[in-house]
Image: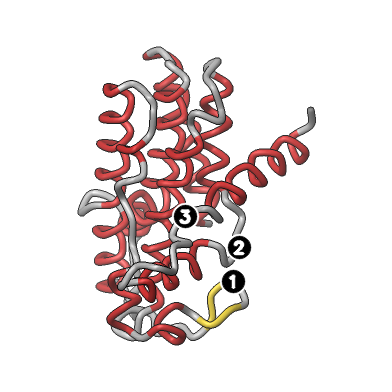
Amino acid sequence: MDYQTQYQVYKALADAALNTYFADTTVSYHRLLEAMHYSLTAGGKRLRPVLVLAFCAACGGDVRAALPVACAVEMVHTYSLIHDDLPCMDNDDLRRGKPTNHVVYGECTATLAGAFHTILSTELPADVRAECARLLAEAAGENGICGGQQLDMEGEGKVLTQEELMDINDRKTSAMIHAACLMGVTCGGGNAQQRAAAAQYAKALGLAFQI
């Protein structure tokens, strides 16, 4: 199967799985779930979940078993975009051709619209779940997208050095791509050599993606 065809297969799997989350309209806090579902299903390239599935398959793993992990990566990526669009950050009105989350649901609900428990509720072995959760938490925290966003805001209106730009890119963009690749290897039962190769690939892809 060629690259584009395989990409679309994995993307379709991820899109179908993502559509099943946060669809319960019977709970008292259903507006929050609506906000989460709204942004999660707004489209996009699904690069990160595709990477999880591709690296899982490359290591001989079960792609469908890795789907919740792939969805978790996209959820964290999506909530980072919701926060990025807020008036206190970039103050964007559109995301992927649709009104941004805070425009539709208000700033307070948009700030709450995030998810992290998905990995831990899968049927994967406990050690795999724990490692995937660790990788995702690291990519989402101060050493990843949060730190990168802080540096990005501090750099606005300034002429940055190449080293400063790389620091922002490594955290804001590459960190989540790195996590996606290594989570795929983890789901597929990959070895140390495969993890090292995935990390090297992720670093190069993250830089290219940011550029």
Q: Looking at numbered disc 3 in the image, what kind of residue is underneath it?
A: Tyr
Which residue does the numbered mark 2 point to in the structure image? 43
Residue visible at 20% across and 54% down in the picture: 142
- Categorize mark 1 by other alpha carbons within 10 Å: few (<14), some (14-19), many (20+): few
**Screen quadrant of the N terminus:** top right
Which residue does the numbered mark 3 point to in the structure image? 21
Q: Looking at numbered disc 2 in the image, what kind of residue is underneath it?
A: Gly
Q: Tag 1's secondary structure?
A: loop
In this rendering, the answer to whether 188 lies above or below 136 is above
Q: Are marks 2 and 1 in contact (CB under 8 Å)?
A: yes
Quadrant of the rendered image containing residue 86: bottom left
Q: Where is residue 206 in the image (x, y as percent from the top left)?
A: 48, 46
Q: Tag 2's secondary structure?
A: loop
Q: Looking at numbered disc 1 in the image, what kind of residue is underneath it?
A: Arg
Q: Earlier in the sequence, mark 3 or mark 1?
A: 3
Compared across the picture, whether 172 is left or right of 151 comes to: right
Mark count? 3
Q: Which of marks 2 and 1 is nearer the N terminus?
A: 2
- Categorize mark 2 by other alpha carbons within 10 Å: few (<14), some (14-19), many (20+): few
Return the residue found at the far left. 142
Q: Tag 3's secondary structure?
A: loop
Which of the numbered marks, if any, corresponds to residue 96?
Answer: 1
Residue visible at 37% across and 63% down in the picture: 80
- Residue in front for this viewpoint, 15 or 209: 15
Q: Position of residue 180 (x, y in %)?
A: 44, 39
Q: Position of residue 92 (x, y in %)?
A: 45, 83
